Image: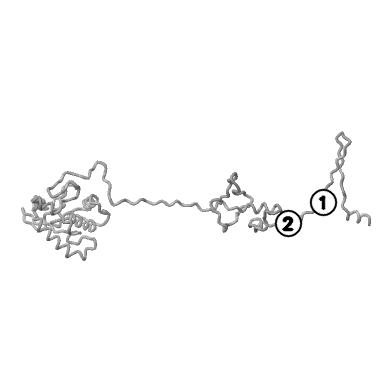
Amino acid sequence: MKNAMDLEDHEHDLTLSLRCGSPERITIQSSPITTLPQTNISLVELQMSYPNYLVSSSNYNINPFLVSCSNHSITPNWLGSSSNHNPNPYPNFPSGGGAANNNYVVDVNAAPTSVLTRRSRRGSSQRWSQGKSETVPAPFPWATDRRATVHNRKYLLQNNVVAISGRFECKRCEKEFEVTLDLEEKVNELRKFIEKESGSMHDRAPAAWVNPVLSKCVHCGKENSAKPILGDKKRAINWLFLLLGQILGFCNLGQLKYFCKHTNNHRTGAKDRLLYLAYMTISKQLVPEWFD
C-alpha cells in the first residue's frame, strides 16, 4: 500500500520505441500532464464586451476562448469610429475585421428608413399653354398686343385716346347699345373710391365691385336691365372699359382667373380676392404713379 502511494507522487516517463526496418530507436519524452483550470462562462458574459485588460498585445496567459470572443465586438463601418457604441449582439457572427472581410451583421428587426421627398413649388410666372403665344392682335386702341394688358394714361393722352367705349345688352328687350366713358373723369372717380374704401378692403373687393348695378337700357328705358357684353373670347374682353365703369364684377370666375394667369397673379381663391387683384392690376397698368 505504501509502495503504491509512493508511485503516485512521482512523475513517470513514457518511452515509445518505433521500428521501421532500422535498428535505430527514437525516443519521445512527453511533458508532464497538467490539468487546465475549469472556466464557467454564461451566455450573458459571452454577449458582453470584455475590458481592454483581458485582451492585450503582451503574451499573458489568457484563455484563448475569451480572446476570440472579445474580437467580435467591432464597430461596423456605417456607425463611425465613436467609442460609445453598443456591443455586437451576435458574437458568433463575424463582422468587418479587415479589407478582405466585408461580412456585416444586419438587424432584421430594424424599421425601414423612409425617404423624404419634397414637391417642387410652382413659380410665380405661369407657363403658356401649347399653341398659345404671349401676344395677340390688339382688340381695342387702348389695349396692347399682350393679353389682359392696357396702355397707361400718359400714352393714351399723347395719342388722343380720351374716350373709352363699350357695348351693353338689355336683358328685357335684348337689344344692344354702346356707351362711351370719359377717360379723365372716370379715372378721378376711381381714385376717390379707392381712397375711400382702402381701409376696409383687406385685399378683397368691396360689395359695390362684387355686385355692380345693372345699367338703364336706352331702348326700353328699363332700370337695372343692361349688362356689358364680354364676348366669347377672353382675349377680347374690354378690360379698361370695365375698370372705368367699375363693372368688373360682371366677369365670371373663369374670366378673372384668365386675367390673373396672364398678369402673373395668384389665381386661386374666392371671387372677391381675384376681383380685387383685377382692379388693382389694371389700375397699376393705367396709372402706375399711384403705386410708386
Q: Find residue 197 and report its image quarter.
A: bottom left
Pick the residue in front: 150 or 25: 25
Count of numbered tags: 2
Q: CA distance from mark 2 to mark 1?
A: 19 Å
Q: Could you tell me which residue is drawn at 17 percent across and 64 percent down? A: 195
Residue under the point 87% across and 41% down? 17
Q: Position of residue 60 (x, y in %)?
A: 72, 55
Q: Quarter of the image containing the C terminus?
A: bottom left
Residue 253 lies left or right of residue 37; in this view the side is left
Q: Quadrant of residue 99?
A: top right
Left or right: 128 with respect to 118?
left
Place of residue 156 in the rendered image (x, y in percent of width and height, measured from the top left): 11, 52
Foreground residue, 150 or 230?
150
- Picture quadrant where residue 40 is located: bottom right
Judge whether residue 1 can be spotted in this image.
no
Residue 35 lies, in percent from the top left, at: 79, 54
Residue picked out by circle 2: 39
Foreground residue among 207 and 98: 98
Residue occupied by mark 1: 33
Q: Is residue 27 left or right of residue 246?
A: right
Of helix, strand and loop, which one carries label 2? loop
Amino acid tagged 2:
Thr
Q: Residue furthest top?
A: 21
Local packing at callout 1 (Cα closer than 10 Å; few below 14, some 14-19, many 20+) is few
Q: Nearer the viewer, mark 2 or mark 1?
A: 1
Name the secondary structure under disc 1: loop
**Category of crowding for the residue at label 2, using alpha-carbon neighbours closer than 10 angstroms: few (below 14), some (14–19), many (at least 20):** few
